[in-house]
Image: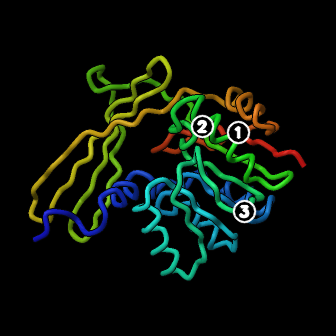
Amino acid sequence: MSRHPPGAEEVLWHDVECGGYNADLPLWRELADAEGDPVLEIGAGTGRVALDLARRGHDVTALDHDARLLDALRERAAAAGLPVTTLVADARDFDAGRRFALCLVPMQTLQLLGGRPGRRRFWRRARAHLEPGGLLAAAIAVGLESYAPERGYDLPLPDVREVEGWVLASQPVAIRPQRHGTTIERVRQLVAPDGRRTQRREVVRLDRLDAATAAAEAAEAGLAALAPREIPDTPDHLGSEVVLLRAPG
């Protein structure tokens, strides 16, 4: 018996922790229908958003820094007969060779760019890739209240997926505010078909950011802020604030 579940490990965990989220899809569909094509998604991962928009007939380019995630996206797009373009690149330094009517930055990708210096680079690249009058929409995590098991908090339910007899479970265990951001800690547990268990702890750090700050930063790159939108809370996920930025016409 294999010592690992089938498939690339990063793809499997990405699907477990991100693949089941869909509260933001109505907004991305609305914006894509309103703004038209082509659409650029930043931080596309294995294609949760890109494939959804492609199924609705949109011309989508999916950008991510992890080639393994985009390999999975391409396989899924090909299997479904969807013509999604992929681009392995850093969101702070990329050249897609074309401009877009809409640029989407789902979940908290904007808060993973290394603070204001990294976001400054991203705003400039995004502005250079928007058509005149194009729109950029980026989700920002809100309401990240501190919790930790040592303080007696009840933990949220884990994200769980079964793959050919292997069970992958990702349990959020702590949110710890810091001076310039927030760390989110998870325990990833892998259960083999024969019952063997292994686990490790993963930590993600999100930069502290709000819509007003993002809008002020983006203005330096020539992007004008519109009224922000909201993605509602779900029983399993906190909501997001979505900053909307328009390129000059």
Instruction: Measure the C-alpha gap from mark 1 to mark 3.
Output: 23 Å
Residue plotted at (59% across, 69% down)? 85
Lower position in the chain sequence, tag 1 or tag 3: 3
- Report x, y in % for residue 114: 51, 33
Q: Which residue is mark 2?
A: 140
Q: Residues within 10 Å of mark 2 (few under 14, many from 20)?
A: many
Check residue 98 in the rendering and tell me which mark sits there, or answer none. 3
Q: Residue at x 67, y 72 (%)?
A: 56
The residue indicated by pointer 1 is 243
Q: Secondary structure at mark 1?
A: strand
Q: Are marks 1 and 2 in contact (CB under 8 Å)?
A: yes
Q: Which is more toward the observer, 208 or 235?
A: 208
Q: Where residue 241 sits in the image (x, y, percent)?
A: 64, 37
Quick one: 96 or 169, which is closer to the camera? 96
Nearest the viewer among 186 and 134 is 134
Residue 28 location, quadrant: bottom right
